Amino acid sequence: EPEVTQTPSHQVTQMGQEVILRCVPISNHLYFYWYRQILGQKVEFLVSFYNNEISEKSEIFDDQFSVERPDGSNFTLKIRSTKLEDSAMYFCATTIQGLNTEAFFGQGTRLTVV
Amino acid sequence: GENVEQHPSTLSVQEGDSAVIKCTYSDSASNYFPWYKQELGKGPQLIIDIRSNVGEKKDQRIAVTLNKTAKHFSLHITETQPEDSAVYFCAASGGFQKLVFGTGTRLLVSP
C-alpha cells in the first residue's frame, strides 16, 4: 500500500521561529496539498501545488507560509515566523490526478508553538 | 465558496446497530463527495466516495447516498463493530484543487 510520509511527527518551536514540515508524496502522484487541523476542529485546506507552482491557496495561507518541492521528491511547507495560533496538525495529501480522485493523507505533523 | 455541514457531532451505538451520518453542501458545482475515517493520531483515510453522476454506492458494510437536488449526502454503516469507532469526516469538491471538510462525527461503538 503506497503511503505519504511526513516528518517530523511532532515539532515544538518558539513563537517567531521558522519551521519546515516535510512530506514525501506517493511516487507517481502529481498533485500535492497541505491541510491543517486545529485540535478538535475540522480539516482545513491550505494550499495545492502542481507542476512546481501553487494552484490554489486559502485565506489561511498568508505571506508567512510557503511551499516548494526543492529536490523533486520532498514537498515542504515553511512557516516563516510562527504564531501561537499556528499550533495544529498539518497534513500533507497527494493525488495521482487532480480531478476528483482519491486524496491520500500522511500521518501528519503536530506543530506546537510555545 | 463551498460550505459543508455535518451532523451529528457525536454518535453512540451498540455493536451490531447501524449508524448514519449526514452532510449538506452549499455549492451546486460540487461533484465529488468522499468520506474519511480518522483514528486517533492518524491522518484521514478514505473509506468511500461518490460522484455526482451516481445516487448510491455500497462497499460491504458501508454505503453512501447522494441527493443532488437537496444537496445532501449520507454515510451508512451497518452491523457496526468496535473497530468502527473513530471520527468520520465528509467532504465536497467541485474541482481538483481542494476538499472542503465537514466538522466531523465522533462515532463510538460499544460492545
Image (tube, coloured by chain):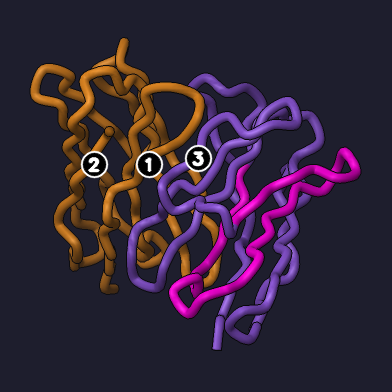
The residue shown at (60%, 55%) is A65
Secondary element at image label 3:
strand
Verify whether residue A89 appears in magenta. yes
- Provide the secondary structure element on which disc 1 rests: strand
Identify the disc placed on residue B35: 1
- Report x, y in % for residue A109: 62, 67
CA distance separating discs 1 and 3: 22 Å
As displayed, is residue A80 above or below residue A50?
below
Query: At 73% from the left edge and 70% from the top edge, which residue is drawn?
Result: A8
Residue B13 appearing in the image: no
Q: Chain of mark 2?
A: B
Q: Which numbered circle lies on residue A57?
A: 3
- Comparing marks 1 and 2, which lies closer to the viewer? 2
Of the numbered discs in the image, which one, if any, rests on residue B4?
2
Quadrant where the image shows the C terminus of chain A: bottom right
* Residues flagged by tags 1 and 3 on a common chain: no
Where does the image place residue B54, in percent across and percent down from the top left?
Answer: 30, 14
Specify few, some or many for label 2: CA neighbours under 10 Å numbering under 14, 14-19, or 20 or more. some
Which quarter of the rendered picture does the N terminus of chain A lie within?
Answer: top right
